[in-house]
């Protein structure tokens, strides 16, 4: 009898230490989805209650989103999925290295992310369901900016920001990091050597 009581007590302590976490997996590339999905899986395996919210832009098995955490899938309209397809974004075109292409791509990419965010945040039923879960913590990727609006809308006050790409000089202020141009890469300074950075 005492062993059962001890086991119940120990298991309740384990539950008391866990957090309820919502991970926003932005509809970005597969590698970004895997990045935040792996974070969710690690936290789930560590004993936390983790849900991954993912606006789906392409049909992939749900295990591609996360293998251990729960999934909350938001199906995007076919028209938006089509606009977001890599085929229509021409990302792998031979002219992708030009500055003009990069500027057009960033503008189009940003507009699509805004459309996704508007759809997600205006879906009251989904927002109510997520709000009723009472998440303790939200995790989003820096370039998946809709996560910030989502967490605000459903009342998540503790936010962790991840970055699957290196932190550039423009991100330093956001992360409250010192700006060290000699070691922090800048997107516009591809060919600047160490001496010129100092």
Image (spheres, rainbow, N blue to C red):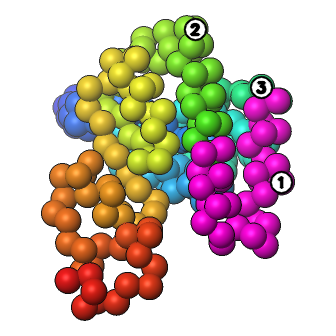
For the residue pair 7 and 165, the one nearer the viewer reads as 165
Residue range in magenta is 79-108
Q: Secondary structure at mark 1?
A: helix
145 sits to left or right of 101: left
Q: Which mark is residue 87?
A: 1
Dot 2 surroundings within 10 Å: few (below 14), some, or many (20 or more)? few
51 vs 91: above or below: above
Q: Which mark is residue 104?
A: none
* Front disc: 2 or 3: 3
Inspect this view and state whether residue 1 appears: no
Earlier in the chain: of badge 2 and badge 1, it is 1
Q: Which SS type dominates the magenta stretch?
A: helix
Badge 2 is on which residue? 125
Tell me which corner region of the image, top left, top right, bottom left or bottom right, holds residue 17: top left
Q: Position of residue 95 (x, y in %)?
A: 75, 70
173 sits to left or right of 139: left
95 vs 81: above or below: below
Q: Secondary structure at mark 2?
A: helix
* Front disc: 2 or 1: 1
Is residue 147 found inside the magenta-colored segment of the image?
no
Badge 3 is on which residue? 77
For the residue pair 178 and 8, the one nearer the viewer reads as 178
Is residue 93 found inside the magenta-colored segment of the image?
yes
């Amino acid at each position: 009898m005492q062993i059962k009581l001890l086991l119940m007590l120990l298991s309740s302590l384990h539950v008391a230490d866990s957090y309820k976490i919502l991970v926003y997996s932005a509809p970005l590339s597969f590698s970004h989805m895997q990045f935040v999905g792996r974070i969710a899986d690690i936290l789930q395996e560590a004993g936390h209650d983790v849900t991954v919210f993912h606006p789906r832009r392409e049909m992939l098995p749900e295990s591609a989103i996360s293998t251990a955490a729960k999934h909350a899938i938001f199906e995007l309209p076919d028209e938006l999925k089509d606009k977001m397809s890599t085929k229509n974004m021409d990302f792998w075109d031979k002219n992708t290295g030009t500055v003009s292409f990069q500027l057009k791509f960033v503008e189009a990419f940003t507009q699509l992310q805004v459309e996704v965010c508007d759809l997600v945040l205006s879906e009251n039923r989904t927002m109510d369901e997520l709000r009723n879960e009472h998440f303790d913590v939200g995790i989003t990727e820096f370039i998946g900016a809709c996560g910030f609006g989502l967490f605000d809308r459903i009342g998540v006050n503790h936010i962790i920001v991840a970055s699957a790409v290196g932190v550039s000089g423009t991100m330093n202020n956001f992360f409250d990091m010192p700006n060290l141009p000699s070691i922090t890469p800048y997107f516009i300074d591809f060919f600047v050597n160490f001496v010129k950075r100092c």
